[in-house]
Amino acid sequence: MNKKYIIKSNEEIEKIIKTGKKSVSKYFIIYNIESDKEYNMYCISVSKKLGKANIRNKQKRRIKDILMKNKLELHRKYVIILRKEVLTSSYQTLCEELQNQIKGE
C-alpha cells in the first residue's frame, strides 16, 4: 500500500472516529468521513488481544492487499478496526465482507 493512502495522524484518526459514520459487522468496525482527496485513505487497527505482532501484521497485510486489489474510489477516509473473528476466516470471506461493508456506506 502506497504511503499516500495511509492515515497516521492520531488527531485525524480520533476525528474520524468521533465524527464519522460507523458500520459494524462480524469481522470489522469501520468509521468513515468524506475526504477532499481524489482517493481513499485508510487506517487499519488491530488490538494486541488478537495475538502477537506477527499475527497482527499478517492480518494487516491481508486487509491492505484486499484494499489495493479492489480499488474503490469513493473519496473517503476510513478507520478499520479488526475483530477477532478475522483470525479464523478465509481470505475470500474477508474480501467479500470488506467490499460489501465499504460499498454499503
Image: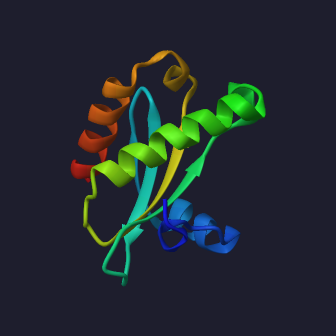
Numbered circles on residues, count: 0
Farthest residue, direction bottom? 36
Spot occupied by residue 47 in the image (x, y as percentages of width and height): 69, 37
From this view, report whether residue 49 is shown above or below residue 82. Answer: above
Q: Viewed as shown, does residue 36 lie left or right of 73?
A: right
The residue lying at 34 percent from left, 73 percent from top is: 39
Which of the pair 99/67 is nearer the observer? 67
Farthest residue, direction top? 88
The residue lying at 45 percent from left, 55 percent from top is: 31
Q: Viewed as shown, does residue 57 lie left or right of 29?
A: right
Q: Residue 21: name its quadrant.
A: bottom left
Spot occupied by residue 1 in the image (x, y as percentages of width and height): 49, 59
Which of the pair 78/19 is nearer the observer? 78
What colour scheme governs how the chains and residues are painted in the rendered image of this protein?
rainbow
From this view, report whether residue 100 is shown above or below residue 52. Answer: below
Spot occupied by residue 57 in the image (x, y as percentages of width and height): 65, 39
Which of the pair 26/94 is nearer the observer? 94
The residue lying at 49 percent from left, 66 percent from top is: 2
Q: Viewed as shown, does residue 77 lie left or right of 47?
A: left
From this view, report whether residue 95 is shown above or below residue 31. Answer: above
The residue lying at 36 percent from left, 84 percent from top is: 36
Spot occupied by residue 87 in the image (x, y as percentages of width and height): 55, 21
From this view, report whether residue 36 is shown above or below residue 74. Answer: below
